[in-house]
Image (cartoon, rainbow, N blue to C red):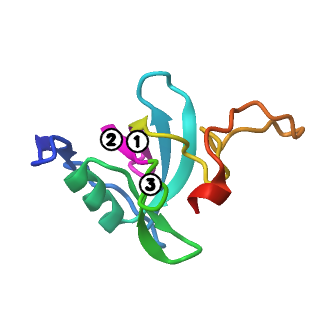
């Protein structure tokens, strides 16, 4: 991989964006290994991520590119982007500012399947959105 102006390496791997033009991307805390969220990435979102050094995703519900933290200020600074062996899933290793989840929690994975809350709330959504 070669470095861009942001210091993030540019993609030299052919990511398989599939028929819908999207791949899942897991955001993981680069230091702790905590899984923060899963979202989808288009080719444009990946390009913007690599250009800026901050996570960009594609919103399937709004059908548009979005910059994580663009509204809340809770950005994900990219430490590294990895691709799985099938080249159809990405892993963003990030330095998370604030919470990753729009519900105010640090991680989107803040409940067990039984409904037990296991994650901490780090901001009040009504004050941010």
Residue under the image location 41 percent in, 48 percent down: 75
| Quadrant (top left/top right/bottom left/bottom right) for the N terminus | top left
- Give SS at disc 2: strand
Badge 3 element: loop
**Residue occupying the far front of the picture:** 127
Q: Position of residue 22 (x, y in %)?
A: 45, 65
List the residue tagged with mark 3: 69
Q: Which residues are magenta?
A: 75-93
Select label 3 or label 2 by which is in front.
3
Is 83 magenta? The answer is yes
Q: CA distance from mark 1 to mark 3?
A: 15 Å
Tell me the crowding category of disc 2: few under 14, some 14 to 19, or many 20 or more residues within 10 angstroms, Cα based.
many
Give the residue pinned by disc 2: 78
The answer to whether residue 55 shows anywhere in this view is yes
Above or below: residue 11 compared with residue 29 = below
Residue 68 appears left or right of 45: right
Cα distance between the residues tagged 1 and 2: 7 Å
Q: Position of residue 129 (x, y in %)?
A: 58, 63
Horizontal relation, residue 122 to residue 93: left or right: right
Q: Counting residues from the N terminus, which is met first, the one under dot 1 or under dot 2?
A: 2
Circle nearer the viewer, 1 or 3? 3
| Residue at the (30%, 54%) spot, across then down | 49
- How far apart are the alpha carbons under marks 3 and 2? 13 Å
Question: Residue at (38%, 49%) from the top-left corner?
Answer: 87
Q: Quadrant of residue 80?
A: top left
- Magenta span: helix, strand or loop, mainly? strand
Between label 1 and label 2, give the one nearer the viewer. 2
Q: Which residue does the numbered mark 1 point to in the structure image?
A: 92
Note whether 60 is above or below 98 in the view shown: below
């Amino acid at each position: 991989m070669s470095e861009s102006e942001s210091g993030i390496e540019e993609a030299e791997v052919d990511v398989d964006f599939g028929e819908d033009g999207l791949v899942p991307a897991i955001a993981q805390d680069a230091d702790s290994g905590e899984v923060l969220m899963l979202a989808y990435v288009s080719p444009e979102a990946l390009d913007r991520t690599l250009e800026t050094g901050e996570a960009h995703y594609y919103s399937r519900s709004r059908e548009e590119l979005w910059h994580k933290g663009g509204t809340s200020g809770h950005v994900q600074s990219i430490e590294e982007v990895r691709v799985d062996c099938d080249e159809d899933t990405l892993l963003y290793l990030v330095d998370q500012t604030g919470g990753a989840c729009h519900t105010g929690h640090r991680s989107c994975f803040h409940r067990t399947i039984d409904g037990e809350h296991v994650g901490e709330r780090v901001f009040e959504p009504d004050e941010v959105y």
